[in-house]
């Protein structure tokens, strides 16, 4: 296995070059288009031997669920409420109805006994809206009890999704301000101090994204700024690799990233990874190089349509405008055992239009990209 790994490394990473050497510009462009695929191949070759070193368990593959858990809040009752309903999806596949019934009863008990504790975490100005949400969640949970007793799987799925969407809205109301200070080293870069939603119109249809500035403010801010500038409008996808990676962001001409019109310089964005349990992201170093490969990022690659910044392999801080969608394949890159986690900055997820994402090829384009919500949270 070790020999095979080295063989793949030598073949796939041969195109890696220094970003600071102008004569290698074209080869660097080639790397940005192929480097993620190389890492994927290396990950697959190393996956079996590394399996015992990486997180195990039922990793979350639903983008909305990941985004709910990624909110910077600290309220145990609402997290317990969320956990009880999130857990249902694991048991629905096996039709474990008694366990599902226990989950629903737990949620009902929290709503009955812990509402005051939940409301304490909501600012006074949003208290009335929060109470309305709790009442609506209670109605959904009551309906879940009935559909669970009837063992109506489609109805349980629909009512669970509705309740969790409202819980996510309630949790978002609990966030007060931005939870930390972005390092001064990156004060010259745009920052997204919260979340934004982006609508992409492509040649195959529409896709909606949620980008998360709570956990990747510099990367998300850079992306939202480029969307506002129209950078991605009429831009072609440069890589659609074997149903694993779909990449875009390489502008026409010799440049491989965004050139700031004010400074006339390449805008470089640092590697930015929030690790579970940390209060702020790590910058400029992979989780592996930091000796934290056993830990997990808040925004993992475990969901189809994870949105990540491309970069040269030898420069964690060399990303700019090129990003990629990870087309998650659980049979080859199991959730919770994904060797891309912590090596690239995930800064958002596709939240609708996943079927469109799967149809896009290198000949397709983003016709237009627009910020729908959260544009006011961009600190230019």
Image (tube, rainbow, N blue to C red):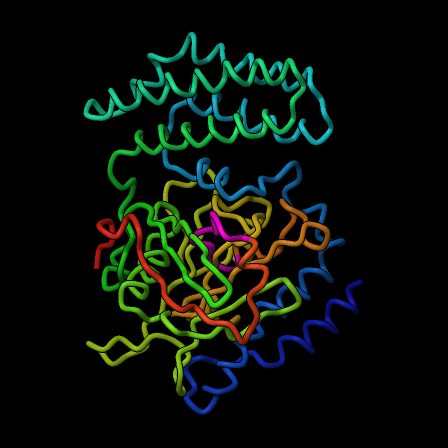
Residue 361's spot in the image, x, y percent? 57, 70
Judging depth in this view, the residue of 220 and 274 nearest the camera is 220
Q: Residue furthest bottom?
A: 23
Place residue 184 in its image quadrant. bottom left
- Left of 2 or right of it: where is 238? left
- Left of 364 or right of it: where is 331? right
Place residue 332 in its image quadrant. bottom right
Residue at image point 55% right, 41% down: 62
User: The C terminus appears in which quarter of the rendering?
Assistant: bottom left
Vertical side of 282 occupied by 25: above or below:
below
Judging depth in this view, the residue of 74 and 154 nearest the camera is 154
Residue at image point 50% right, 37% down: 65
Vertical side of 226 occupied by 110: above or below:
above
Residue 249's spot in the image, x, y percent? 43, 71
Residue 351 in the magenta stretch? The answer is yes
State which region is magenta: 343-354
Residue at image point 47% right, 70% down: 248
Residue 302 in the magenta stretch? The answer is no
Residue 368's spot in the image, x, y percent? 36, 66
Place residue 158 in its image quadrant. top right
């Amino acid at each position: 296995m070790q020999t095979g790994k080295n063989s793949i490394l030598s073949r796939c990473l041969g195109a890696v070059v220094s970003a600071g050497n102008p004569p290698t510009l074209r080869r660097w462009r080639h790397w940005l288009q192929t480097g993620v695929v190389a890492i994927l191949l290396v990950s697959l070759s190393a996956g079996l031997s590394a399996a015992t070193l990486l997180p195990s368990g039922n990793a979350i593959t639903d983008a909305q669920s990941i985004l709910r858990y990624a909110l910077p809040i600290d309220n145990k009752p609402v997290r317990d409420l969320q956990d009880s309903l999130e857990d249902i999806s694991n048991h629905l596949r096996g039709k474990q109805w008694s366990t599902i019934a226990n989950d629903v009863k737990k949620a009902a008990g929290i709503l009955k006994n812990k509402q005051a504790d939940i409301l304490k975490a909501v600012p006074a100005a949003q208290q009335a809206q929060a109470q309305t949400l709790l009442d609506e969640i209670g109605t959904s949970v009551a309906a879940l009890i009935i559909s669970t007793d009837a063992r109506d799987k489609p109805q349980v799925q629909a009512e669970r999704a509705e309740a969790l969407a409202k819980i996510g809205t309630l949790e978002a109301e609990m966030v007060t301000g931005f939870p930390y200070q972005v390092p001064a080293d990156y004060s010259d870069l745009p920052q997204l101090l919260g979340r934004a939603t982006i609508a992409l119109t492509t040649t195959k249809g529409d896709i909606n994204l949620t980008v998360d500035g709570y956990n990747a403010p510099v990367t998300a801010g850079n992306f939202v700024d480029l969307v506002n500038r129209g950078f991605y409008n009429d831009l072609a996808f440069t890589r659609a690799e074997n149903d694993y990676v779909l990449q875009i962001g390489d502008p026409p001409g010799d440049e491989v990233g965004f050139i700031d019109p004010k400074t006339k310089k390449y805008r470089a964005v640092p590697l930015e990874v929030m690790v579970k349990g940390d209060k702020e992201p790590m910058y400029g170093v992979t989780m592996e190089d930091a000796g934290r490969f056993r830990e997990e990022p808040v925004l993992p690659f475990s969901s189809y349509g994870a949105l990540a910044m491309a970069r040269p392999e030898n420069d964690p801080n060399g990303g700019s405008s090129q990003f990629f969608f990870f087309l998650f394949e659980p049979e080859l890159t199991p959730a919770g055992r994904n060797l891309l986690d912590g090596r690239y900055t995930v800064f958002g997820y596709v939240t609708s239009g996943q079927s469109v994402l799967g149809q896009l090829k290198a000949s397709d384009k983003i016709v237009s990209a627009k910020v729908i919500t959260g544009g006011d949270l961009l600190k230019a």
